[in-house]
Each structure stands twice: as C-alpha cells, then as structure tokens.
Image (cartoon, rainbow, N blue to C red):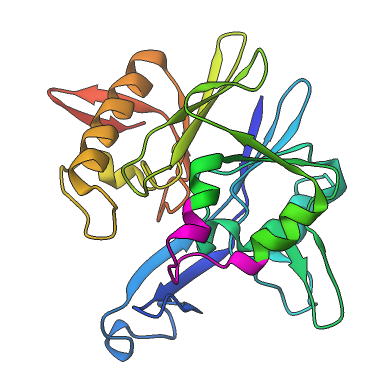
C-alpha cells in the first residue's frame, strides 16, 4: 500500500466556523483572537484494488480555480476519476467540503466514480441537530447523486477495509483500518488528528465527549504501537504519516 498526504493548507477558524488561510510567515495570531489554528490534509491510499481518499478537505481552490485536493491527486500521479472510495470519518465542513466540486456555474461530485462511505447516524445528526459545523447543502447534492454508502456501527467494507464507530469528537465519528499482507494503515479522523495529541493527555473543548475522545486517543495509540500501524494524521503540524512506539507508559512518534 502507498499512502500520501494531500496537504490543503493551514487555517484559522473562529466561532463562526469560518476557515481563513493562515500563513505564519505573513499573518499574526494576534490579529485573529479567539481562533483555532489548524492544518488540513486529506489522504490518498493506493491499495491492491482501490484508490481511497480519507476525508475530503475543505474543498478550497488554487489560483487556477482547481480544487486543491484535485491538484494534489494529480501531482501524485492519479486522476480524481480514479478514486473508488471516499471514506468519511465525519461530516464537519473541514472534512467534507471537498466531497463536491462547486463553481459559480456548476456543481458536481469531486470523485464521480467513488462510493462515499458515511455513518448513517452522522448523516442524520447533520440534519437533525443544526450546527455551523455542517453544510447540509453539500449533503443534499451528494444524496441526489446516489453515491452514498451508509454504514452503521462497526463492520467491514471488504476483506481489507474495516470501520469502527467511536463517537468522542462527534456522536457518530468513525475510524478506518486498511490491512493488506503485513501492513496496516489507520485513519483516525479527529479522534487522532495530530501525533502530538498522543504525547499528552487532555480533554478538548471542541470534542462532543472530551473524556471519551481522550480515552480513545490512548486506546488507538496502544493498538497502533502494538500492531505497527501506519497512522494518518489529518491535522498534523509536522509528521502527517507516522508509526507510534511505546515510551514507558506513554508514546513516541517514530
């Protein structure tokens, strides 16, 4: 298997859930009080049978009016039409905006030949519990396309891809494991968004259940270390793809 980070940029996000590009070289955090500063990077995974995108990013565009995620996929040697699966950890906008390709004149699926795998509970929560974190107009178009594959709880998509309903960050958050031969790739979405979060225990205010999310980080860290997993960190500041090792009662990033 081959995993690649599809870096979409660094951003500040405030209470309005507006994402603004943030370059530390030219911008100051003091000018954006009350903001959270994050990096956004979906992932591409080539397996024996599939080309997989893990979460779809913000759907922002480059200076040529091309989706950044499309630009990065092409740089990796593939085409967006080659993607066969889009595996969604959850539907917050910074993870789901890139599911569709919307311009002033047109709207289409970003990955027209792909199956979009989503927890049914997360989909229903997006509609039944209004939040600025969800952009339901994206989901309306996706639903009409007929490309959604709803899953519930824990299970397997095929012999190599499994999913686990975790909750924690949001009520119906899920993670994915892909196994081929002696390799395992883990995508933790916002349960394990940065490697640094394994190095310290804390409860984040932005999580639906902060204590559960903290416990899950430790649980998946232990499983990753034991299983020699390659972990994909969606909001990583430094290492986007890394293995996890044990260091006493804690962890280290390899």
- Residue furthest to the bottom: 31
Position of 127 relative to 190 (above/below): below
Count all numbered tags in the image, as a single digit.
0
> Residue at horizontal 28%, vertical 36%?
217
Residue 90 visible from this viewpoint: no
> Residue at horizontal 44%, vertical 85%?
26
- Residue furthest to the front: 128
- Residue furthest to the left: 249
From the viewer's perspective, tell me whether residue 90 is left or right of residue 209: right
Question: Looking at the picture, how far across and down is residue 142, in whole percent?
Answer: 73, 55
Q: Nearer the viewer, residue 192 or 24?
A: 192
Position of 91 relative to 225 (above/below): below
Residue 187 highlighted magenta (yes or no): no
Q: Which residues are magenta?
A: 125-137
Q: Nearer the viewer, residue 207 or 68?
A: 207
> Residue at horizontal 66%, vertical 12%?
159
Residue 248 visible from this viewpoint: yes
Image quadrant occupied by the C terminus = top left
Question: Looking at the picture, how far across and down is residue 233, in whole percent?
Answer: 45, 44
Image quadrant occupied by the N terminus = top right
Question: Looking at the picture, how far across and down is residue 61, in whole percent?
Answer: 70, 73
Q: Nearer the viewer, residue 3 or 116?
A: 116
> Residue at horizontal 65%, vertical 68%?
137
Position of 61 relative to 220 (above/below): below
Question: Looking at the picture, how far across and down is residue 118, in whole percent?
Answer: 59, 41
Rendering quarter of residue 82: top right
Residue 132 highlighted magenta (yes or no): yes
From the viewer's perspective, tell me whether residue 46 is left or right of residue 7: right
């Amino acid at each position: 298997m081959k995993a690649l980070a599809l870096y979409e940029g660094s951003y500040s996000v405030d209470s309005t859930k507006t994402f603004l590009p943030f370059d530390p070289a030219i911008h100051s955090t003091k000018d954006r009080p009350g903001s959270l500063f994050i990096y956004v990077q979906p992932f591409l995974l080539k397996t024996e049978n599939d080309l997989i995108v893990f979460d779809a990013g913000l759907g922002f565009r480059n200076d040529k009016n091309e989706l950044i995620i499309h630009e990065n996929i092409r740089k990796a040697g593939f085409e967006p039409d080659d993607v066969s699966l889009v595996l969604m950890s959850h539907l917050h906008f910074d993870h789901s905006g890139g599911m569709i390709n919307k311009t002033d004149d047109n709207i289409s699926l970003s990955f027209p030949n792909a199956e979009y795998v989503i927890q049914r509970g997360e989909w229903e929560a997006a509609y039944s519990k209004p939040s600025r974190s969800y952009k339901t107009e994206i989901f309306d178009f996706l639903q009409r396309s007929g490309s959604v594959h709803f899953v519930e709880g824990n299970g397997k998509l095929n012999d190599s891809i499994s999913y686990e309903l975790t909750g924690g960050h949001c009520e119906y958050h899920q993670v994915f494991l892909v196994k081929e031969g002696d390799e395992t790739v883990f995508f933790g979405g916002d349960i394990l968004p940065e490697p640094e979060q394994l190095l310290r225990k804390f409860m984040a205010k932005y999580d639906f259940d902060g204590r559960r999310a903290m416990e899950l980080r430790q649980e998946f860290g232990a499983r990753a270390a034991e299983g020699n997993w390659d972990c994909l960190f969606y909001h990583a500041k430094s290492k986007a793809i890394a293995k996890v090792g044990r260091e006493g009662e804690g962890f280290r990033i390899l």
